[in-house]
Amino acid sequence: METTEQTIDLCRWLCNSMFEQRKLAYKKRNISLTFYTQKKELPRVKKELPEFKQYTHKYCKMFASD
C-alpha cells in the first residue's frame, strides 16, 4: 500500500519528467509538445514503470496536466 507521500512523489516525478521532455523537445528540435501529445505516452509509462501500474490513466493524467 502506497502512502500519500509516496503517491505525491510519483506524481511530482511524472510532472517534472514531462516538463523536462517539453523543454528538451523545444531546445533540441524546436518542436512544442503539449500535454495532449504526452498523455498518449501514459499507457507505455505504466507498462515500463511498475510504480505506476496501480494508478488509472485518469489519475496520472490529472496530475500530469497541472
Image: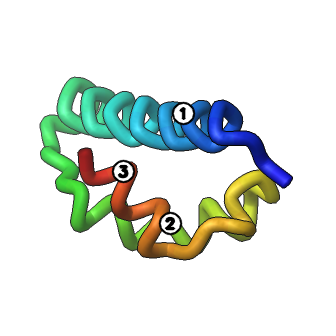
Q: CA distance from mark 3 to mark 1?
A: 10 Å
Query: Tag 2 or tag 3, which sits nearer the N-term?
Result: 2
Task: Estimate the x, y position of residue 63 in percent, counting from the top left.
Answer: 38, 51
For the point 41% across and 39% down, which residue is it?
15
- The residue beneath circle 2 is 42
Q: Is residue 35 above or below residue 4?
A: below
Residue indicated by mark 3:
64
**Front residue (pair 45, 11):** 11
Q: Position of residue 36 (x, y in %)?
A: 23, 66
Q: Secondary structure at mark 1?
A: helix
In the displayed structure, would residue 33 be above or below residue 27?
below
Under mark 3, the amino acid is Ala
Which element carries disc 3, helix, strand or loop? helix
Residue that label 1 marks: 13
| Whether residue 53 is situated above or below residue 64 in the rendered picture | below
Q: Earlier in the sequence, mark 2 or mark 1?
A: 1
Q: Is residue 44 above or below residue 66?
A: below
The crowd level at tag 2 (other Cα within 10 Å; few <14, some 14-19, many 20+) is some
What is the spatial separation of the Cα atoms under label 3 and label 2, in whole angstroms?
10 Å
Quadrant for the C terminus in the image = top left
Horizontal and vertical percent position of residue 52: 68, 58
Residue farthest toward the right in the current orientation of the protein? 1
Say which of marks 2 and 1 sits in front.
Answer: 1
The total number of labels drawn is 3
Apparent side of residue 29 relative to residue 60 in the rendered image (left or right): left
What amino acid type is highlighted by mark number 2?
Leu
| CB atoms of marks 3 and 1 within 8 Å | no
Q: Are the two marked residues, 3 and 2, in contact with CB atoms closer than 8 angstroms?
A: yes
Quarter of the rendering containing residue 1: bottom right
